[in-house]
Every structure is written in C-alpha cells, then in structure tokens.
Image (tube, helix red, strand yellow):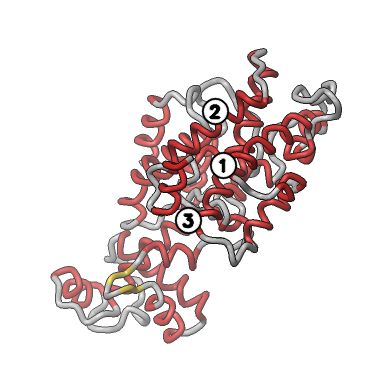
Amino acid sequence: MVDKIQSAIHHWTGNLLSYVGELKLINSVLFGLENYLCSALLLPKIVTKLVNKLCKDYFWGIPTGKRKMIFQSWKSVCFPWSEGGLNIKELMSLNKALLSRWVWLLTQDRVGIWDQWSRDYNMLGSFIWTTKSKPHHAESWRAILKTRDYLLDIAENQNAAQAILNSCVLRGHFIVRKAYDIFRPKHQKLGWTRVLSCPEILPKHRVCTYQADQKVLFTIDRISSRGYPLVNWCCLCKCASESHRHLFFRCQYSQHVRRLMLQWLGFPSSWSALDLKDWLYRLLHQTCTPKWKIILMSSCLAGLVFVIWEERNNRVFKGCIRSPNQVATQLKWVLKTCLSVSSVSQLRCWIENT
C-alpha cells in the first residue's frame, strides 16, 4: 500500500494544481488505495504515520521540490468542513470504521458462507462480544477482535456497543460514513460553513473563503510575523498595511469591486459596510430570504474573496494590474456560468434575465 501511494505521488505533478486539486487527488486516489487493506487489517501506527506523512508532504508540495508555505496544521486540516477543516479523512478512524462493519455483520443472523465459517471456526459457537483471540486466528480476524475491544472500551458494555453499531445502519446496510463520524476526533462546529456548503459555489472559491475567514492566507502581516523582513503595504489601494481584515473588505479597491457586484445583484447598499465575518453571519441568519437569493449572495461572497486575492497575487508576482471594473466583469461571467446550471429553477431564471 505504501509503495502504491509513493508511486502515485511520484507520478503526479503538483506544481500546476491548486490546493483544491490536491485535496481531490488525496481523497479520491490515495484513500481509495487504502480502503481495501483498511477493511481487512488493523494498520500499525507506524504505517498510518507514514501514510499521513506522504499525504502531508504531497499537500505541502515537498515531493515536487517547490515547498509551499504551511498555512495550517495537518491535524486541523483533517477535520470535516463543518468543523473548520478541509475534509481529509483521518486514517486511523477510517480503519476502525471499515473494520466495525465486520463486527456488525457478525451480530446479525446471517447465513452466508463467511458468517457461518467465522462462527464455527473462529468463534466456536459463541458470540462476537465474548470471543477470545486464539493462536490459530488469522491477522484479519485479530483486527476484527481489536476493533470489537475498542468499541467495548468507548461504550463500556455490550448493549451500548451494539447500539453504536445499530446507529450506523440505514435500511439494512451498514454506512461506513456514519461509523467514521463516531470514531474520528471531534472539534467545535462552525455555523458559517453552512453558508458555503451549497454545490453552486466553485471549490476554489470555497477554499479561499475558508482560508480568509480562518486568517491563514499569506498576507504580508502574517509573513512578517514569521520573521521575514517585508514592507507591509497593500498593493491594491496603497493606502494601508495589508492584512486579512483590510483586504476583506476595508481596502478601497475591494470595496469598489463589492459595490459593483451589489449593484449588479440588486441587493441593498447596507451590505457594502460589512466585513467578511459579518457578511457570513448575516447570510447565516437570513431566515426569511428565499433560498435562491442566499445561494446567489453566498456565491458572490466566495467569488469576491477569490478574485480579490487573485488580483493581489497577480500584482505581487506577475506585475499584472486590472481595474475594479475588469475584476467585477470577470466575476460576473464566472457566476453566470456556474449558476446557469443550478438545480434551483428561480436562480436559473434570474441568470437568464440578467
């Protein structure tokens, strides 16, 4: 498994991929390689640490030779999106969740070949909750018993452990996603993430807004705090020092772009006085506003954060300068393209008539 992951990472070229592209590869390809063994064996901690290191090094660009600056710890990145992470799976919890499916199967009255063989050969006619490990047991069966022991430890008794397994069942099928949610580490939920959870928002816009709200984008003030001697000056408005609070949205340049977008959307001018966090929480508590307008404002907010950060990087690294009208025009085109295929009919009608 480790060799396959190393081979996959070695053949990937991450220089041209954004964080979103790398996240997709890690979640779909790397964890796809791990799922088979994780459902059959309890991986040793040294293996899980090695796999996490390979994924972490790839995400931060170490194998490509162009190391990116680390904006967050790997532990916090592995939390779900609703808890302030980037939804990368935590390997040890995933391993236990996949193995817990076999424990649940042995608690059911199934008459399959594997069930009958396990009861006759490994369990010797007893129950899964009381079966003891024997020298002749295979490593896969030992992994199932270790997962059972872990369930008993967190539940304290057999009935509570059975209730945990039953809570992961939907229409007679064991849902590994629910089991993973039980085993994984927990963190405090962030309410504003619901604002950016609609599928109409582009993933790169969503991740950039997440980084801006968490204040982990590499603005000049954040880079200077790490000991790099830089002149702290906003390259957009040239009127103040650069920080997250200034860029989103106290900078004159970003305020101009935002006013143009609010005029296009036809929303009240009171929204133009909100900072990023205030805007997120205002959207979160818009209970009387139609759903399609919430999606429209959420998409606009995420797009604004992305294009402002993109314009800042283009000026710093490429020397390319665009006016607020040009940036707003580009964002309008992107929003029209994305929202025109939305499943919300009112939103598609608004785009067609705009």
Q: Residue at x 80, y 30 (%)?
A: 242
Question: In the rendered image, which residue does mark 3 sit on?
Answer: 92
Q: CA distance from mark 3 to mark 1?
A: 25 Å
For residue 274, above or below residue 257: below
Q: Which residue is mark 2?
A: 330
Of all residues shown, which one is farthest toward the top? Answer: 319
Judged left or right of residue 229, residue 341 is left
- Picture residue at 54% right of the left edge, 28% below the top: 330
Disc 2 to disc 1, C-alpha distance? 19 Å
Q: Residue 28 location, x and y as percent?
A: 38, 43
Whether residue 172 is situated above or below residue 98 in the rendered picture: below
Residue 109: x, y in percent?
Answer: 21, 82
- Check contact, mark 2 vs mark 1: CB within 8 A: no
Question: Residue 253 vs residue 150: left or right?
Answer: right
Q: Which mark is residue 207?
A: 1
Element on which disc 1 rests: helix
Name the N-terminal-most of marks 2 and 3.
3
The three-letter amino acid code for the residue at tag 1 is Val
How packed is label 3: few (under 14 Cα within 10 Å), some, or many (20 or more)?
many
Foreground disc of the pair 2, 3: 2
The label on residue 306 is: none
Q: Amino acid at mark 2?
A: Gln
Residue 334 visible? The answer is: yes
Type of amino acid at the residue the image marks with label 3: Met
Picture quarter with the N terminus = top left
Residue 273 percent coordinates (x, y) = 77, 46
Q: Distance of mark 2 from mark 3, alpha carbons?
A: 43 Å
